[in-house]
Image (cartoon, rainbow, N blue to C red):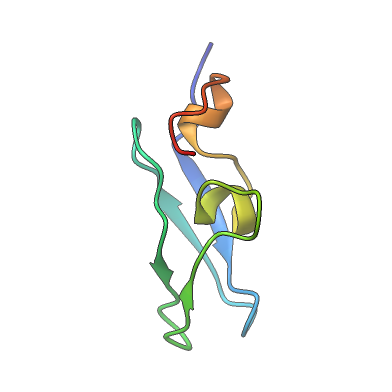
Amino acid sequence: MNIILKSTITCPNCGHKKEETMPENACQYFYECENCKQVLKPKQNDCCVYCSYGTVKCPPKQVGTNCCE
């Protein structure tokens, strides 16, 4: 299985989009929008900001593990 490490995060506050490289073996709980400076946290029942606001789920979720929760 190929793991995708690039995900585009869309800020729910201002709509700014940026492609980021996700960590391979961990989840990212906080993300600061470079445009409006809003600090994003995962939505309820999501393990990280990529699962909540990204175009691609985090690598642990892609391989089917729950290491983030």
Total numbered badges shown on the rendered structure: 0
Q: Nearer the viewer, residue 60 or 3?
A: 60
Q: Is residue 43 above or below residue 25?
A: below
Residue 60: x percent and y percent?
47, 28
For this orientation, the residue located farthest to the top is 1
Residue depicted at x 42% and y 54%: 20
Q: Residue at x 60, y 42 (%)?
A: 56
Residue nearer the viewer, 41 or 12: 41
Q: Nearer the viewer, residue 19 or 32?
A: 32
Residue 11 sits in which quadrant?
Answer: bottom right
Residue 2 vs 4, above or below: the answer is above
**Image side of residue 28 versus residue 42, left or right:** left
Relative to 68, 16 lies left or right:
right
x and y percentages locating residue 48 in the rendered image: 50, 50
Give me the residue at 34% from left, 40% from top: 23
Q: Position of residue 26 (x, y in %)?
A: 35, 38
The residue lying at 62 percent from left, 85 percent from top is: 14
- Residue 15, given in percent of the width and then of the height, sits at 64, 78
